[in-house]
Amino acid sequence: MRSFAALLTPAAGNDVKLTEWITAARAVNLPHLRSLTNGLEIDRSAVDGAVTLPYRNGRTEGVKTRTKRIMIQMYGRAGFNLLRLRILLP
């Protein structure tokens, strides 16, 4: 089951390897692995994109997290204009 870690580095052909891994994981008959494989199959197109394409959304998630943190810090203290300035001017 360690072969799953190799799939986390995006490369062409990983979607086929993922299908093989899912088949092998289901053959082991462990409840937690079966749950994981079912979850992977639910949104298979997104999972295939994650294991084959080199694109990531880490920077977007970082901006979103920073914005939420600023909003929490400023809760009830100021209006939208000050919030806008704090986001645009770090």
Image: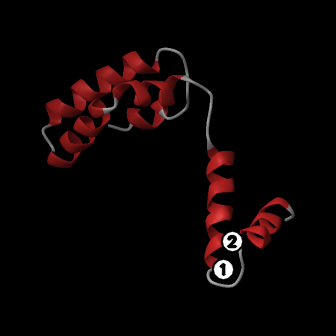
Give the amino acid at mark 1. Gln
Q: Residue at x 23, y 27 (%)?
A: 24
Expressed as whole percent of the image width and height from the top left, the position of residue 76 reads 62, 83
In this view, 11 is above or below 84: above
Q: Which residue matches tag 2?
A: 70
Relative image position of residue 60 (x, y in whole percent): 65, 47
Q: Secondary structure at mark 1?
A: helix
In this figure, which residue is indicated by the disc labeled 1? 73
Q: Quadrant of residue 3?
A: top left
Name which residue lies at 34% across and 27% down.
Answer: 44
Dot 2: element: helix
Query: For mark 1, does the 10 Å Cα neighbourhood hold few (<14), some (14 to 19), or many (20 or more) residues?
Result: few
Give, as a three-letter code, the residue at label 2: Ile
Classify 10 Å Cα crowding around label 2: few (below 14), some (14-19), many (20 and above): few
- Image position, residue 12 (x, y; %): 53, 16
Identify whether 18 is placed above or below 42: above
- Single out the residue that lies furthest toward the right: 89
- Residue closer to the observer: 24 or 51: 51
Relative placement, left or right, of 48 versus 83 is left
Contact flag, marks 1 and 2 (Cβ < 8 Å) = yes
Q: Is residue 37 left or right of residue 88?
A: left
